Amino acid sequence: MASHFKQTYTEDSPYETEASPMASDSITKLHTGEGARKFASQPKKERGGPKPARAALIGVALAALLVMVAGFLFIRALVGQPPDDAGDTPDGTQLEQQQTATVSVDMQTGTVDSGSISYMDETFSMVNIEGSVAVVATDAVGNQRTLFKLEGVPTSLLFYNGIILVPENLNDGWDVISYVVGGESQAGPIVENGEPVRGEGEIIDAYLDGSELVVVDAAGASTRIAL
C-alpha cells in the first residue's frame, strides 16, 4: 500500500514527517463523520419475520366470552326463573287439574245436593233453576253466574285441566256434557269421531283415570272416553 506520508530532513530533526494532502483529506473526513458510515454495522434482521400476536387474540376471545356470560346473566335476572309447574297461580298455590264432586238429585222435589270444585278464584257447583239442574260459578264475593243447564240428571261433577265434565242419565241412555272454563264455546256432549258419545243403560259411577273418563253403567260395563 502506498504511504501518504513523506519524510523531510532538517537540521533540527533528522527526519520530519509531513502529511500529504490525500492523508489530510481522509483524516478530515473521519473527524466530520464522513467515511465512518462505511463501517457502521447494519442491524440484524429477525429470522422468520414478525410473529402473530397470539396473546392478544386469546385476550380478545376471553373478553368476548365474559361479555356473553354477563349478558346471559343480566337477561336471566330480568326475566326471572320459569315456574316449576305451569299449573301454579301467581301466589304459588298449585291448581288442582283433576277434581271430582259428588252430586245427587231428589227426583221428587228436584232438590240438588252438590259438592263443588274450585278453579281460578271461582267455585263450581250445581243448583236447581226453574226445574232444571244447572252448573253455576260463584266468585270470592258471592256473585253467581249460570254456565249451562242440563237436560238429564247428573251423577257427578268432574274437572280435568280446565274442563268441567258432567255425566248425566237421560231417558234413553246417558252422555257426558263438557264445558271449557273461560272458553267461548257452549257446553255440549263429548264428541268422538264427529259423533256425540252416548251409552245405553244408567250411569252408576264415573271417574277420571289419567287422561280418560271412565263411565260405568248399571250392567257393570265400562266405557273409556279419551279427554
Image: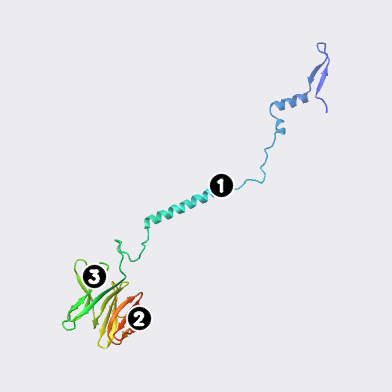
The image quadrant of residue 111 is: bottom left
Q: Identify which residue is drawn at 77% across, 25% down.
A: 23
Q: The residue under label 2 is which amino acid type? A: Arg
Label 3 to label 2: alpha-carbon separation: 27 Å
Q: Position of residue 68 (x, y in %)?
A: 46, 54
Q: Which residue is mark 2?
A: 224
Instruction: Judge the density around disc 1: few (<14), some (14-19), many (≥20) Cα neighbours within 10 Å.
Output: few
Instruction: Judge the density around disc 2: few (<14), some (14-19), many (≥20) Cα neighbours within 10 Å.
Output: some
Q: Position of residue 211 (x, y in %)?
A: 36, 75
Q: Identify which residue is drawn at 29% across, 83% down.
A: 175
Q: Disc 2 on helix, strand or loop?
A: strand
The image quadrant of residue 110 is: bottom left
Q: The residue under label 1 is which amino acid type? A: Ala
Label 2 to label 1: alpha-carbon separation: 70 Å
Q: Which residue is mark 3?
A: 123
Q: Which residue is mark 1?
A: 55
Label 3 to label 1: alpha-carbon separation: 68 Å
Q: The residue under label 3 is which amino acid type? A: Thr
